[in-house]
Image (spheres, rainbow, N blue to C red):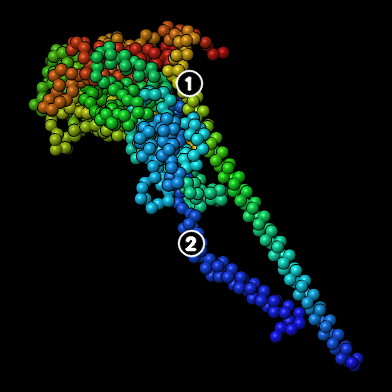
Amino acid sequence: MLRGPEVRLRLIVLLLGALVLLIVGQLVRLQIFEHRRYVVEAKQLLERQYSLPEERVGDLFDRNGDLLVGNLPVYDVDAYLQREYHAEAYAPQLAVLLNRPEAELQTALTFPEGDPATSVWRPLAREVTSDTVRQVQELELPWIVFVPTWKRYYAEGALAAHVLGFVNADGNGYGIQADQWPLLFVPPQRSEGQVSVFNEPLPDEVAGRSVTPVRGMDLRLTLDRTLQAYIEGELDRALLEYKAEAGTIIVMNPRTGEILALASRPTYEPSRYPDYVAAGQEALFRDPAVSQTYEPGSVFKLVTVAAALDLGLVNTGWTYEDRGLIEYGGVPVRNWDRRAYGVQDLEGLLAHSLNVGAATLSTRVLGADHFYHYVRAFGFGQTTGVELEAEESGVVHMPEQWDWQDGFLATNAYGQGIAVTPLQMAAAVAAIANDGVLMQPRLVAERIAADGTRVPIAPMPVRQVISAETAHTLTELMARAIETNMKQATVPGYRIAGKSGTAQIPVSGGYDPNDVIASFVGFGPLPDPQVLIMVKLDRPGIDPALRWGTQTAALVFQRIATRLLVLLHLPPGG
Amino acid sequence: MSVTWQKRTHGVQRRQEAFDRALARVFLAVVVIATLLASLYLAVVARNTRLSGQVWQMERELVEWQRKNEWLTVETARLSSIPVLQQRSIALGYVPATDVHYLVLLEP
């Protein structure tokens, strides 16, 4: 019997105490003994892996800091649908704003019948501008999500298309962007934490996460956009003037290997690359300057003469008798005009571009071992290492190879039967201009990290191919050769060294009887060359008697050199 | 009622009251401390949530500014691109230099 207030009070205290103990016991069970299980369950409900916001790809600038490739901020528009939203009713409005077919949006916005899921995700539009986003936001549709992303922007349109290139969604592409992609782009990092129904991290997660988005590096290139634009204009003009099918112009600093301008035709617009893929025109993406080989023709005589001079086997007083024909390995070699030039020295060999003279040097003076040692030393048969995707190494037949023919030693001496890229040829001639030192051609002048740290890329000498003395002697021979025999390549007020070439085009079973590749490589101003220009025109369609390198590419060279020397602030007379 | 009994009885009662008072003080102290700790915890959690919200907001603003900055970079590049500059130059009456003369200045 409960008697008296004191007893009842004690009983209530006991009951309350028991209740408190029960609650405390439960708390202990939940918070301590079963803590791990509930944490796991809570994590499963709220925490997910998610991607951090995509950082922009690194920008590309020209040597003066002008933007060539940047990033336009755009948005992807997605819908998180639930059955009760009846989102399909907004299809007509969204179709107008997002510039998409209404029927397509109607399908996308209709919640699938019989789907047991409570919500579904649907992409609505890609790469829309912030203006469009603002207009869609005015509809106040809570189920539409805008995902910020980037679109590559080419500030100068199709300028330097082959150099800049592009990279597709799979990370494959062309040009310097494809080659430098690991530096330019850091894949979005992933984190794990509490996310909203729209898969966006909650504030606590954002504040507490240890990883941050990482931006790719910017690159300052060696290209000069003004020179590039000028070169491309001249190349277009040359193709029209000489009715050539294709062409390449390279402008380099022979001292540093920096490529100041590099243009090829036909070309494309990198920002519209999917259109070219759809039209089956992927071949346009390959840069002919590094990805297509050609037989260089007479320009290659410079390598032959350089080798003979450097070994001391000949000097400027060396002569031979040119009878207009020499036979070696069963291959008859004739001069371009089938004439015999009589007694000739090295200057005459270069000035008249005598095949017989070059073959005489390679077969009777040098021999295969010496000749091919220099061919390899000048960088032929191997990639230059320039920062461009899909660079070809060319084809150099070596005596120890199974497909070797003795006649190669004679024909290779004047640039036939050997395949090189225009950039290899330009780099090799640049070595002559650079006191015999072969420099690696390069396009990246500086890497700029996200925090602003700048890392300049130093010039990269590959090797001393020929002695400085040999280089100077050969340069003088080249200069005298064009001053006496090719005035159309000279520039008033400046001394220029150069060599032309007119090469046959190999086709199955021999050479194309109708078409040629005309080229000219020159550098100046002497005695301290600062710029090298290479002009290559494929299949000029003019009168066959007028399509020699001396009559086409040399004239283009002269026009470009005259203008470039001014643009580069190189006054006459040094 | 003897004096001895009274003393004993009164003594027990006083000890009990003293014990109850001490218990009450301890209980009160525990309640006060628990309340203080709970308040402190709540304040910390509230502050943490508010700061997290601010950090989240600032991160969003940072991203937005970065995107605006990039848009301005792109817009600047568009306005200073070669085709635009060429058009403006032509409109202003400039022509390409055809005959360049150098003025040679001797160094002092």
Q: Residues within 10 Å of mark 2 (few under 14, many from 20)?
A: few
Residue that label 2 marks:
A40
Q: Is residue A114 above or below residue A105?
A: below
The chain carrying label 1 is B
- Decide: is A100 above or below A480: below
Asked if residue A375 lies left or right of residue A4, the reply is left
- Res. A386 visible in picture: no
Q: Position of residue A338 (x, y in %)?
A: 13, 14
* Amino acid beneath label 2: Val
Residue shown at 32%/21% (left/top)?
A249
Label 2 close to label 1 by CB (< 8 Å) = no
Question: Which residue: 67% across, 74% down?
Answer: A16
Q: Quadrant of the C terminus of chain B?
A: top right
- For label 2, the SS is helix
Give the x, y percent position of residue A176: 37, 32
Q: Residue at x 53, y 49 (%)?
A: A202
Disc 1, SS: loop
In this view, A326 is above or below A52: above
Residue with the mark numbered 1 = B80
Where does the image place residue A333, in percent across and percent down from the top left?
Answer: 13, 21
From the viewer's perspective, tell me whether residue A158 is left or right of residue A189.
left
Residue A463 marker: none
Q: Quadrant of residue A22?
A: bottom right
Where, by quadrant of the figure, is residue A75 drawn?
top left
Q: A151 and A332: which one is in front?
A: A151
Residue type at tag 1: Ser
Percent across and percent down for residue A528 are 40, 19
Q: Residue at x 49, y 30 (%)?
A: A131
Marks 2/1: CA distance?
Answer: 56 Å
Up the image or down, B100 lies above or below A285; here it is: above
Q: Nearer the viewer, residue A297 or A515?
A: A515
